[in-house]
Every structure is written in structure tokens, then in C-alpha cells.
Amino acid sequence: MIGGRRDEREERVELRGLATGWDAARTERLLAGVHAQIGQRRRAWRSAFASVGVASAIAIAVILLPRDRAAAPEARVIRLQEGSEIRLDPATSEVRVVEETPERVRVDVVRGASRYVVVPNPRRAFEVRSGPVTVSVVGTEFLVERRGAATWVEVTRGKVKVSVTSQTDSDGDALLGAGDAGLFPRERPPAAAPIAEEGPGAADPAREHARRSRQSYRSEVARRDYRSAYAELARNPAVAGDTVDDLLVAADVARLSDHPAEAVPYLQRILRDHPRDERAPMAAFTLGRTLSGLGRTREAMAQFARVRAGWPRSPLAEDALVREAEAAAALGDVAAAVRLAGEYDRGYPDGRRRAEVRRYARLE
């Protein structure tokens, strides 16, 4: 086919190779923020929501709001003397600044979710305590949400250390980086059910093998042994499951074990089999990111366009437009980049990323 070789080269352009100034943590802010919004809504429907998180997950500085935004109270911003900020919804959340000195800041979470934007200062300790969980930082952005006896922590930018005051062996310190998230104290992996001995009444060997494989996979995921979990998944793909949560976990297992290409089919299944699920836009955006990381830029560009077209009111829509413009620039499609810059101006006249989009379109 004429031009086929050129198209193939175009599709392998790697976005992260561009000197565009795109901050990877910015993407993680989006995903974890959307994850947090979804979690809040699902908690309104049932007692709790937690997952391994697309790591693809995880955090934008999105204040958690009820579905009816018009009726929602305004978010409160607490500005500390050294410049850091705490953002929360006073209707659902409460924090107490119990210590604020040049050497140390300590905040206690009483209830709900609160987001922290911490000014870097290596000479000052910044701690957020939520029950037995302590999050220690130098300069970063992260979310802390108290969920009964447990605490959900999402990191947007930088790194945090999470410590748990507990007598259990599994509650050691954890270091989380941008995009990481987790529920603390960590739940212990479920005890393995005793394996029935083979006998006249035992299950047939195929079913027993499948049961053992599922049990092994889930235990490895719970221990965050993603390489072993991926090996089990590769041997027996059926252990991935079919629910949205199952597929998100399987995508994370592939990605976190350094097999990002294998995450693609799981994200595609979410979009194909669960298009109405409220996590579908997050899966589509994550799929676009994964494709761009694999150098499949044209496909990534189409996914970001899909996020905007399918979920125009999603918090991910603005960043999807930016990533779409970035992909157009990487492919040398200046006309598309100019068109997208115009769409950004119309859709986000006060958007903070206007200059970025204009650079992709060569307008600045």
C-alpha cells in the first residue's frame, strides 16, 4: 500500500520523547481524582468502594463533590502560613491543624476526604494523621480520606511515606509515588482455604486446577507481588474475571509487572462490555495513556478523542484534549493541532493549559 510504511512509522511515534513539558504527574492527578469522585458516589450507594486502582491510578486536585454540583457547598481552602493548602468539602469533611511551626506541621483528619498541596521544604516536617495512619511528606500533592477504621491515600505528585501504628506484622511503612494509591492499614491476604484431598468425591482435576490458580492469583495481588500474579494470569487468563474491578486489577497487574501491552485488552474489554459504567471514561483515558507509552500514537489520539466525545463533562475531558493535541503534534498533523487549540479556547477560555495547546499547534 502506498504510504503504508510511513503510516506505520507515524503510529509508533512516542509521545514521551517530545520536549513538550508535559508533567506525567499531571496525568496521575486526573486519574486518581476521578477515582476518588467515583469512590464517593459509590459509597453513597453502598458502604464502601476500594480497588487496587488503575495505576494507571491514580490523582488530580478535584474537590469531591456530590452529583448535583449546583446544590453542592463550596469547597473550603485552608492556607497555612508556609504556603501549603488543604482543600475539603466542609459538609462532609473535617480536619484540625494541631501544630504549625517553621519546623513542623501536623494535621489530624477527623472525617471525610481532604487534599493537600504541600510546598517543598526539606527543613520542615509535614504530617497528616488519620487514626493509626500517618502520612509524612516534604513537598507533594496527595489525598487523604478517612473510611471508618481505614484510610485511603492517593499521591498526585512527589512521594509520601505512610506509617501505621499497629501490632500486626503486615503494617510496616509504605512509600507511595505519583499515581500510587492504597487503603491503610493493609488488609491481610485471605487465608488459603484447605485443599481437599483427591478422592472419589473430589472435584474433577480441571476444576480443582482452576480453583487453585484463582486462589494463587488473588493472594499474589493482595501481596502486591505483581510479577507472580502476571505469571499466573499468563498461564490461566480466566483468573482475570469479568467485572470492571477485576479487569482494572488485571490491567494493573500487567502494567506493574512491566507488560503494558498486555494491559490493553483488559481496558478494551471494560469499554466493550461495560460502556455505561462510571469508570469507563477512566479506562478509556488510561488506554490512551498506555497506547501512547507503547508508541501507538495514532490509536492513543483516537482514544483521547473518544473520552471527549463520550464523556464531555468528565474531569478527564480537558486533559484528554491536551493529550490529543500533543499526539497530533507528535504525528506532525499541524492542522489537527490548530483545530484542537481552537476547541480548547472555546471550551476552556480560562484553562491553565492554553499555552501548552497553542505550542503543540505552533501558535506560540
Image (cartoon, rainbow, N blue to C red):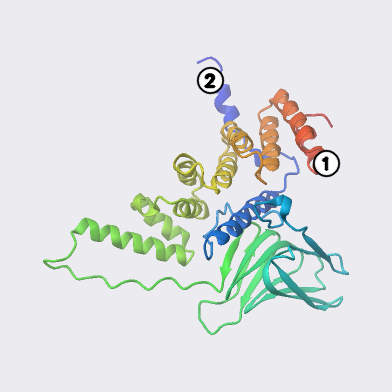
Where on the picture, by quarter, is residue 83?
A: bottom right
Q: How many neighbours does mark 2 have within 10 angstroms: few (below 14), some (14-19), or many (20 or more)?
A: few
Q: Position of residue 3 (x, y in %)?
A: 56, 17
Q: Seen from this angle, which residue lies furthest bottom?
A: 167
Foreground disc of the pair 1, 2 = 1
Residue located 34% across and 52% down the image: 235
Q: Calculate the distance from the C-alpha at mark 1 to the C-alpha at mark 2.
A: 40 Å
Q: Can you give x and y, in whole percent of width and height, for residue 194 in the image?
A: 28, 73
Q: Is residue 140 above or below residue 267?
A: below
Vertical placement of 306 versus 122: above or below?
above
Residue 5's quadrant in the figure?
top right
State which quarter of the image contains the C terminus.
top right
Foreground pick, 28 / 296: 28
Q: Which mark is residue 350?
A: 1
Please state if 293 lies on the left or on the right of 122 as rendered. Answer: left
Could you say where residue 272 lies in the image, as x and y percent from the top left? 46, 39
State left or right for residue 217 relative to residue 39: left
Q: Is residue 201 left or right of residue 97?
A: left
On screen, residue 204 versus residue 295, left or right, reads: left
**Residue holding disc 2:** 4
Residue at the far front: name it.
71
Q: Secondary structure at mark 2?
A: helix
Q: Which three-letter amino acid code belongs to the residue tagged 1?
A: Asp
Q: Amino acid at mark 2?
A: Gly
Where 109 sits versus 91, above or below? below
Front position in the image: 142 or 291: 142
Q: Which element carries disc 1, helix, strand or loop?
A: loop
